[in-house]
Image (cartoon, helix red, strand yellow):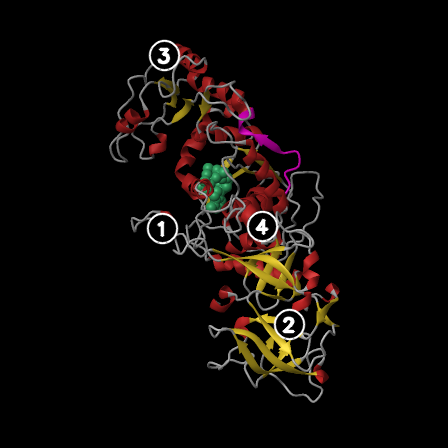
Amino acid sequence: MSHTPVPAKTAHSATASAAPASPATRPQHFIRQIIHEDLASGRSTSIATRFPPEPNGYLHIGHAKSICLNFGLAAEYKGRCHLRMDDTNPSKEDVEYVDSIQEDIRWLGFDWGEHYYQASDYFGVMHECAIDLIRQGVAYVCHLSAAEVAGHRGTPSIPASPSPWRDRSVEENLAEFAKMRAGEYEEGAATLRAKIDLASPNMHMRDPVLYRIRKATHHNTGDTWCIYPMYDFAHPIEDAIEGITHSICTLEFEVHRPFYDWLIDNLARRFAPSRPRQYEFARLNLTYTMMSKRRLLELVRENLVSGWDDPRMPTIRGFRRRGYTPAAIRHFCETVGVTKYNSLTDVALLEHAVRDDLNRTSRRFMAVLNPVRLVIENYPEGRTEQLVAVNNPEDPAAGTREIPFSRELLIERDDFQEVPQGKFHRLYPGNEVRLRWAYFVTATHVEKDADGNITTIHATYDPATRGGDAPDGRKVKGTIHWVSAPHAVPAKTRLYDRLFLKENPNDDSDGKDWREHLNPASLKEIQAYVEPALASVAPEERVQFERLGYFVADRCESAPGSPVFNRTVPLKDTWARQK
Ligand code: ATP
Ligand code: MG
């Protein structure tokens, strides 16, 4: 499956710019099946989906799954996908989030064109819908407190007890609702509730709240309103207004669907002939990851991470700063599929997708993370020569570059052992190895400091092996990377590990606070030494440090001449090994 971004070509500007793979190569899933049948039977002539984030946080990888699904299906079936800010709760929302959501969706490769909407733009229509329901005798103003409503609720087998205000007249309800709207009641003193079925086994049908009082300033509508619609009331109306055909949400909304349909039925006159339908799929959960926006906000507010874009965060921003590519994230979302069963996806699958993409696209360089000096005794002092290295063996078009070689090099400390342990084929006294792109060298002896730590390794080289091959055909078992010490560029480099040590940090059955599962070693900051060509990489360029992993020049802190790198993923692929 490939995801080559191409511009949207259809008349609908809200199609995704990331072209899907041909239908034949795509995994089939039940939502695709439903759309296929709806188009074939003529129930829908074209499809409209939507991605409806609440702007109360930054988007995370779970949202990416929903974005890829909604925008992806719209593109595949030449329909449209709306971006709708579900901003019905004034107290938690913010324009900072609105802006970041738009930027992140575009970065993922999708475009809503002219189809940008805000739930708050419909507050007027929603208010009319509420009055409509009151007039039909299916909504009433209730003065029970939230605690009293909970006390009246009953159980699935015991019906709820009716509110004392359930049988008010239409006129009285209209007057009371007007008082709510006018600000004459304090928060909690009145709600508008639907009048449905107090004995329904579905608790969401037992006179759910439609409107509540919130005396808060809304980031879009300011102080125009002091009553705000509940999500369950607002969402079907938003879908109906926009002509959404397939309203795709996560599984926990399955029990809300009867109310969704009840509301659409009762307001059908206003919206006919368009009738949206809700379909539910299982949300994405990842091992070693917390995804709830509430938790992510706590991580940020408590300074447990450096911000929403901390490369350890499962946010789109975090992954971007970590070096993940939009193509890899889209590919991962396609691979995990769409099901009706909640499950926990191995985060190694995401890392596998990232590695797979970076392997094809990133240039290789040499860098040393934990250096020790290597002196080539028979190499002339003061001499520098330029050796040629291949930039990307997966991509001939990436060409070659020159790397300076000299008498004093830096190599990785753990590529040397004074006394080789087990099957150690790298450098040890008397052993010959290849210096990548350079020469064969043989270690001779070491120098140590007063504490016995190795400070310098001495070696000799074979001038006949220039480029890394022996003309006499002799082989070596180890190849190690290096940088020339006088030419090396120091670079602040961050190495990451999982943010949580527990496989499922969302599971609190152990009675522990989730913070106890944080990995104290999730971030390690070091000074690496990189080859000179890496000094000038552009911020956000993704590269491979040979043998060490994929790294990205930090998009905020890196600058040509003083590069800063984040490790995206190490090279070892635990997912590929499991298979
Ligand atoms: P969270 O639970 O993380 O706070 P949310 O559902 O409250 O998320 P919204 O902004 O309401 O966040 O989500 C926007 C859309 O993204 C919704 O349609 C929701 O179903 C979908 N979504 C959220 N989390 C996931 C997930 N983990 N997997 C798939 N889709 C998700
Ligand atoms: Mg939500």
Foreground tag (2 vs 1) = 2
Residue 506: in magenta span: no
Q: Please tell me the numbered disc located at residue 516.
A: 1
Task: Determine if the C-beta at disc 2 is less than 8 A from ligand 1.
Answer: no
Residue 562: percent from the left, percent from the top? 66, 54
Question: Disc 2 designates what residue?
Answer: 409
Gap between marks 4 and 2, in whole Å? 31 Å
Residue 93 visible in image: yes
Looking at marks 2 and 1 on the same chain, the residue that comes earlier in the sequence is marked by: 2
Looking at marks 4 and 3 on the same chain, the residue that comes earlier in the sequence is marked by: 3
Question: Disc 4 designates what residue?
Answer: 321
Foreground tag (4 vs 3) = 4
Residue 340: percent from the left, percent from the top? 44, 49
Q: Please tell me the numbered disc located at residue 169.
A: 3
Residue 120: in magenta span: yes
- Label 3 crowd (10 A; few <14 / some 14-19 / many >=20): some
Position of 309 with respect to 504 (left or right) is: right
